Image (cartoon, grey):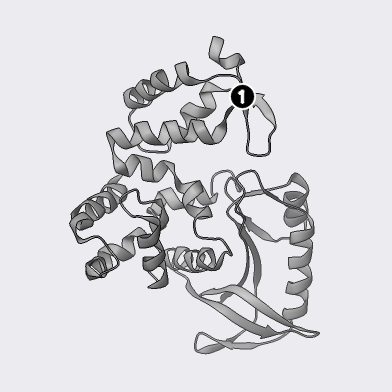
Amino acid sequence: MEYQKRKIKKQSGELIDFDINRLRDSLSRSGASIDEIEEIIDRIQPQIHDGISTKHIYKLAHKYLKKYSGAFAARYSLKRALRDLGPAGFYFERWIAKFLESYGYEAITNQTIQGDAVSHEADVIAKKGKELLWIECKFKNSTDAKIPVTTPMYLLSRIKDISTQTYSLFGGDYKFTQGWLVTNVYLTSDAIAFGEFYGLNMLSWNYPERKSIKTLVDQKALYPITCLTTLTKREKGYLLDQNCILISDILKNPDILHSGFINHRNTSNILKEVEGLLAID
């Protein structure tokens, strides 16, 4: 098609061919029907021109999805919502802890552990049964960021330094059994190769292919509150400060929406969007 030949600009400034199938695939994650997706594409295609930014295309897709359903738009914005857990990544670490709890782990953040040689600050420590996980979180604000091979190399050295010690955690004495690298962005091919060779577990936006962050989040609707279109930036900040990290946290404690920091006239819309997100198959 004619539009397939247009060049679009990534955040890095790189020009790439516009791929309508890639846009279609990204829209399919929103929960919209095939017919709705095709209608959105029909609206977007005439607006694609040489040099248009991927950010602009995202905004168009988000706008049209929102006209069908705020929940569709919220789900579509997951990648951006994870970036909004920054800027430093503190809330990303807390989101990872709740993410793991949803998969049956106990999890804690902000711990300092003494290794054989030096002490180490743990982003997240998680336990399930006899498994004790050391989790290194790498948060990035850039959409095109990639985690280099030096990061799993560094993690491997940390795991080596703490692997012989026994630690009193979660009401018992345990040794670390696994090291994990978790990031909201991408891994370079060298980082993946190194991690796989040395048995490091890695979780990124698109890795592993069938158990990536975007896949696992959709499976259990573990969406951060930053994806909600019915909340302002200020309201999101307030909820995060109250440890309301997942959208499901709002349903567990709906009274949190009655704070003076939340527009009370919008409460029903917020709850409707949350319930819509949790209901998407």
Query: Which residue does the image show at 60% across and 52% down from the upper left?
Result: 204
Q: Secondary structure at mark 1?
A: loop
Query: Would residue 56 appear left or right of 63 to someone viewing this image?
Result: right
- Numbered disc total: 1
Query: Which residue does the image show at 65% across and 73% down from the upper left?
Result: 177
State which quadrant residue 200 falls in. Answer: bottom right
Q: Is residue 72 visible?
A: yes
- Where is residue 243? Give x, y as percent: 40, 71
Q: Which residue is mark 1?
A: 51
Query: Would residue 84 appear left or right of 274 to someone viewing this image?
Result: right
Query: Which residue does the image show at 56% across and 33% down from the upper left?
Result: 54
Q: Is residue 1 visible?
A: no
> As shown in the figure, which amino acid type bears the numbered disc 1?
Gly
State which quadrant residue 166 falls in. Answer: bottom right
Vertically, is 219 above or below 164?
A: above
Of 144 and 156, which appears nearest the observer? Answer: 144
Vertically, is 46 above or below 134?
A: above
Query: Which residue does the image show at 35% across and 55% down from the upper left?
Result: 232
Of 257 and 189, which appears nearest the observer? Answer: 257
Of 203 and 75, which appears nearest the observer? Answer: 75
- Where is residue 26? Give x, y as percent: 48, 34
Query: Would residue 42 appear left or right of 115 to someone viewing this image?
Result: left
In the rendered image, which quarter contains the N terminus?
top right
Query: Would residue 265 appear left or right of 204 to someone viewing this image?
Result: left
- Where is residue 75? Give x, y as percent: 39, 44
